[in-house]
Each structure stands twice: as C-alpha cells, then as structure tokens.
Image (tube, rainbow, N blue to C red):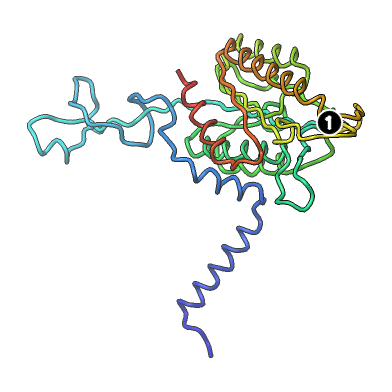
Amino acid sequence: MSLPGPEIAALSLRREAERTAGALPALLVAAERLAATVQMGGHGRRRAGPGEEFWQYRPAHSGDAARFVDWRRSARSDTQFVRDREWQLAQSLSLWVDGSASMRFTGAPTGRAARPTKGARARLLALALAVLAVRGGERVGLSGPLAPPRPGRAQLMTLAALLGDDAAPGPDYGTPEVAGIAAQGRAVFLSDFFGDIGAIAAALGALADRGVTGVMLQILDPAEEDFPFDGRTIFESMGGRLRHETREAADLRARYRARLAERRERLARMAAEAGWQFSTHRTATPPEAALLWLHAALERGRG
C-alpha cells in the first residue's frame, strides 16, 4: 500500500532530521538540553541603538529621520513616535576548561550509579554556557589559540569538537591559559584548582589588569571532599607522578579536610580581589544548579 504524498514528505523530513541530529556531537546535544533549563535574560547593555529587537516607543525628536517613525503607533495620537531598537554590546566570553590528568578522576564505587569525571562535567558546563552565549548574540571561545571567541552556530560545532576530544591528558594538574582572553572581556575557569596556586593567582592578576571579569567554578568529586578512606590505602595521582601509601588513611582525614578548606578559602579570596566570583560544584549533584549559578554570576559581573 502506497503512502499519500504528504505522508511520504513527512517521513522523508523526519528521516532527514534524524540524520542531522545523529551527526551532532553527543556533547553538544547534552549541552543544548542543559542550556534549555536556563531562562535567558536579555544579553547586552540595554540602550537605544542599532539592533534587531524592539525596545520602546518614544516621541520623535528634531533630527529623527522619517524612516524611523512608526506611523501606525503615531496614528493613535497627535504625536509622532519612533520605534527604538535595543543596542547590544557584543561581548567576548572565553572559557578555560582544565584538561589535566586530575580532571579524569571519579570516585564512584564500582557497582553503583556512575558519576561523571570532573573533566566530563566541566566540558558539559562549558559548552552549555557557550550555547547560552551564542543565543544571546555574544562571541564565545576557548582561552587558548585553538578557538578564539566568535559568534554563531558554527562556533558551537567547533567548540563541541574540541571539548569532546578527550585526548591524552597533560600534566597532573592544570594552570589557566589566559593569553587569548581579550581585554575587557569575560572569562570562566572550570577546574579542580589543585594546581600551583601561585600560577592561578598570577593568571587572575594578569586578567584583572586587562579589565577582564569572570567566574571560577571548582569542580570536585564527593570523594575528594569527604575523604571516605580507611585502613591501608595507596593514593596515586591520575598521571601516576605522585604516590603516597598509608596504613591508617582515617588518621589523615581531619588534616586533609582542613587543607582543602584552606585552599578553597584562599581561592575565594583571590577571586574576590580580582573582581571575580567563586563557587564549588560536586559531580554527584545535577549540573543544572551549577549552570544557573554560572549564568547568574556572569550577569552580575556585567557591572
């Protein structure tokens, strides 16, 4: 039995849509779903000027060109009105996603529900932020030389390809890459920040000198915060360069937690001194809350 013409067309369209969706990187699909949970506010600084979105009606002034007069609105009164559009300042957002070996860690016990690695969560949040930025008309890119900030859907595909390429990791711990971050722009750092804290401070200082504002999100696995280890334990860095063995891991718990809290307080203080914002996210919690915080923090940082 042959199908009617409209049904054949609909089936063909559906198959084409499925092929197109199947060609999208899985990371981009997940990021767009995550981004859909955030209700976008208006990007850019609201003021009259060139743009595409309607902002307000205002009475016409001397010097306004006739082509800007909204004659339909003006016909309802004795005053001529101009239809103002919103001027949007296209901002630049640069993302640094720590690709070091330590970001490959997940402490999910074998046999239980899997948790993402810290790196996988960082990449998902970074790309979801990029989706939101592109939707808002902004330029977005990575902080290094591979993908400088650009607008548009094509840039999302580039970022998805780069962030989805989970190649061999670098050193045990990461250092922010800031050379490609534009002056007066905005930046997001996604990392566990277990690397050299002096290098992190230097990066923040250099960006503050260039008028860059931003946010730092520390991404940790619950095991790294709770330290649920007892008895004989061998601790080894993800890159295999550091190793420590102890017979009573529980004896280290209090000191470890104190040092982690001290580092977190220092990171928060460094961020505040640079005019940035800082928070921590656990990989066992849903990513939606982290994305909401990141988006809100960037909006607050517009000044």
Measured as percent of width and height from the top left, residue 228 is found at 76, 35
Q: Residue at x 69, y 13 (%)?
A: 201
Q: Is residue 263 above or below residue 76?
A: above
Is 92 situated left or right of 180 in this image? left
State the residue in front, 200 or 89: 200
> For mark 1, does the 10 Å Cα neighbourhood hold few (<14), some (14 to 19), or many (20 or more) residues?
few
Measured as percent of width and height from the top left, residue 218 is found at 66, 27
State the residue in front, 25 or 231: 231
Q: Residue at x 47, y 79 (%)?
A: 5
Is 141 situated left or right of 71 in this image? right
Q: Residue furthest bottom?
A: 1
- The quadrant holding residue 125 is top right
Measured as percent of width and height from the top left, residue 111 is found at 77, 53
Measured as percent of width and height from the top left, residue 191 is found at 70, 28
Identify residue type, mark 1: Gly
Q: Residue furthest left?
A: 78
Q: Is residue 142 above or below residue 135?
A: above
Tell me the SS state at disc 1. loop
Q: Which residue is mark 1?
A: 170
- Quarter of the image where the C terminus is located: top left
How many circles with numbers are drawn on the protein? Answer: 1
State the residue in front, 208 or 116: 116
State the residue in front, 258 or 242: 258
- The quadrant holding residue 284 is top right
Q: Residue at x 41, y 24 (%)?
A: 45
Is 214 situated left or right of 53 in this image? right
